[in-house]
Image: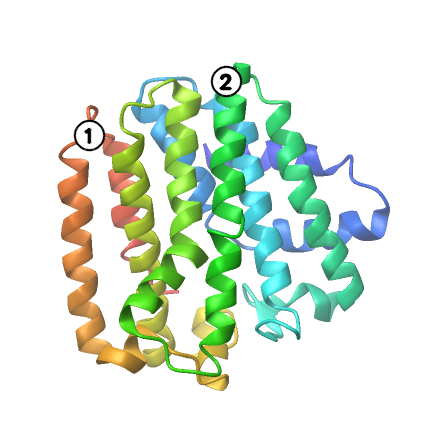
Amino acid sequence: MKAHFEEFLRELCEQVQPAEIRESIEYSLYATSKRLRPLLLLSVIRDYEQNVSIGLEAAAALEMIHTYSLIHDDLPAMDDDDFRRGIPSNHKQFSEATAILAGDALQSLAFETLTNANLSDKAKIQCIRSLSYAAGANGMIMGQAMDLAGEKTTLSFDEMMMMYVGKTGRLFACALEMGAICAGHTEDLALLTRIGENLGILFQMQDDVLEATSDEATLGKSLSDQRHQKSTSVSLIGVEGTKEKINRIYQDILDDFSQLTQPLKHTRSLIEHILQRNS
């Protein structure tokens, strides 16, 4: 499934011009990546017993949005990170201007790709609505804005949970939502949204623990939270407190899975794999 997706993604990017922007896009898009979000989307389709090929455009659009956000987040005006996925950040490899344009191009290409999906017009509109919400002012943008604010003031725990939902949870929720939409099963959307948002919180809390207990070589990225003295779950409730919170939220995810109309076994297995990561 992942190999098929990678091939499809490469074919989409061959059309990008000029060459410098295409090379910048490919540099970040093809860097070592777990492809968690597109794989979640495709796993949902598989669990609903549909052909995963119907979700390739949606999965590619989702990964493009995620990659664009990473390119822009690394810029000096944002997190100012020199490394991403074990290699120099896009703006360090190319230039700040090229990185900005590559991110902008990925954002546009994501929605262009969605419009070409082999889905009904209704399903396309639902997917576009889900992705634009996740990437917009109530999703990633909100999360990044709160993250930057956390450099200047200490966030409350509730504010941090909202930030984590925006930074990561909304895109995870979008992955699960678009999988269900592509498969023609929207009866579980509310539960899938909650599962995805909680998964995003856990993912960010994992990052907090890893950054507090690991090093840059292992993580493949700069320890920017420490450098900028950002508010994190570890800075507020400590490593052990964060681990306890992770366990409680994970139980909430399992409870929501038990209420789905379909067991979504492959999707649940993938989420369990995500929560066992060490980088």
* Left or right for 246, reference 163: left
Q: Residue at x 65, y 73 (%)?
A: 77
Residue 13 spot, x, y in % from top left: 71, 38
Residue 19 spot, x, y in % from top left: 85, 47
Location of the N terminus (image quadrant)? top left
Location of the C terminus (image quadrant)? bottom left
Residue on which disc 1 sits: 260
Q: Residue at x 35, y 30 (%)?
A: 44
Helix or strand or loop: what does disc 2 sit on?
Answer: helix
Say which quarter of the image contains residue 267.
top left
Amino acid bearing label 2? Lys
Amino acid bearing label 1? Leu
Residue contact at pointers 1 and 2, CB within 8 angstroms: no
The Cα–Cα distance between marks 1 and 2, rounded to whole angstroms, is 23 Å
| Residue 149: mark | none
| Residue 122: mark | 2
Residue 118 spot, x, y in % from top left: 56, 17
Q: Earlier in the sequence, mark 1 or mark 2?
A: 2
* Left or right for 19, reference 246: right
* Residue neighbourhood size for the residue with mark 1, other residues' Cα within 10 Å, grouped as few (<14), some (14–19), many (≥20): some
Helix or strand or loop: what does disc 1 sit on?
Answer: loop
Residue 93 showing in the rendered view:
yes
Depicted 75 relative to depicted 25: above or below: below
